[in-house]
């Protein structure tokens, strides 16, 4: 049946024709490439997001520095700096930074005001470039067990009455030495200080006592300042204790 062969070839070619056309059409149709815009990178780039000083030597003050650069094409404005502890006293040169401009955020720790051991502090930075952003900076260090210390770490006065009120600061040296207090002073005239001398504790250490007095009839509102304690110790030449005085809001006298 040789006459069937041409027919078979025709039928086979006819059956494969749709498949071939489909392959050709698919080859000519190029798939669309989806374009997804990458999110804009943050405007501020920090050299490091964590400062770890490890164990430190006895000293009156330790600072951690975080250097950053505005890597965006526009201005960046820092809207808030919120520390995990007010004792860090963050310092920032200014709030707005232009393209390519650098800045530094400094955090401070007063070892004499803190308990010994490993410490981890942080500060949350909020800023705006093309959108609101937030970054956390971490500051770690280990404070020595034996040191010169002052308690309490801060003083608060609530002057609700019309009389002066007093509190005491205590300075103690656990290093086995007898530190010499050379002077005490207040940065705010509403608060006065007086050195009372040293007393020996049950453990044989000398504890220096300082009387801090908030003035009578303190003006209404909040008044802040710092008590400075000068010593003859090279490692701790000055101890600082912040204070806050809350003055009573005066009530209006009743009318006739």
Image (tube, grey):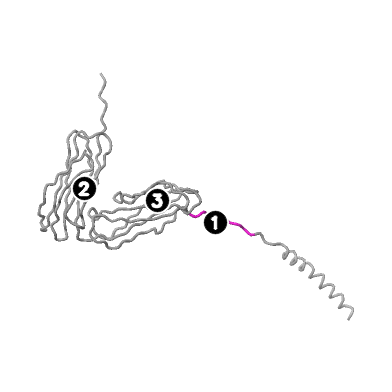
Please name the predominant secondary structure of the magenta segment in the image. Answer: loop
Label 1 Cα neighbours within 10 Å, binned few <14 / some 14-19 / many ≥20: few
The residue shown at (85%, 73%) is 10
The residue stretch that appears in magenta: 33-41
Label 2 Cα neighbours within 10 Å, binned few <14 / some 14-19 / many ≥20: some
The residue shown at (39%, 47%) is 94
Helix, strand or loop under label 2: strand
The image's mark for residue 125 is 3
Judge depth for marks 2 and 1 and give the one in front. Answer: 2
- Pick the quarter of the image with the N terminus: bottom right
In the rendered image, residue 37 lying in the magenta stretch gets the answer yes
Residue 212, quarter of picture? top left
State if disc 1 and disc 3 touch (CB < 8 Å). Answer: no
Residue 48, quarter of picture? bottom left
Q: Which residue is mark 2?
A: 228
- 11, 204: nearer the viewer: 204
């Amino acid at each position: 049946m040789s006459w069937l062969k041409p027919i078979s070839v025709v039928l086979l070619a006819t059956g494969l024709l749709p498949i071939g056309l489909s392959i050709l059409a698919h080859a000519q149709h190029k798939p669309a490439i989806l374009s997804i815009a990458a999110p804009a990178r943050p405007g501020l780039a920090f050299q490091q997001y964590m400062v770890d000083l490890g164990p430190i030597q006895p000293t009156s003050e330790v600072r951690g520095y975080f250097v950053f650069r505005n890597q965006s094409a526009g201005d960046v404005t820092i809207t808030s700096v919120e520390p995990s502890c007010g004792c860090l006293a963050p310092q920032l040169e200014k709030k707005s930074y232009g393209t390519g401009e650098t800045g530094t955020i400094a955090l401070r720790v007063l070892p004499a005001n803190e308990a010994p051991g490993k410490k981890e502090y942080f500060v949350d930075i909020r800023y705006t470039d093309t959108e609101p952003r937030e970054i956390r900076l971490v500051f770690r260090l280990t404070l020595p067990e034996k040191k010169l210390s002052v308690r309490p770490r801060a003083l608060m006065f609530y002057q609700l009455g019309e009389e002066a009120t007093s509190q005491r600061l205590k300075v103690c040296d656990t290093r086995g030495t007898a530190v010499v207090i050379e002077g005490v002073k207040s940065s705010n005239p509403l608060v006065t200080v007086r050195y009372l001398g040293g007393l020996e504790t049950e453990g044989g250490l000398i504890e220096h006592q300082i009387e801090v007095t908030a003035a009578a009839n303190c003006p209404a509102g909040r008044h802040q300042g710092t008590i400075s304690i000068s010593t003859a110790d090279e490692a701790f030449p000055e101890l600082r204790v912040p204070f806050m005085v809350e003055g009573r809001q005066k009530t209006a006298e009743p009318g006739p």
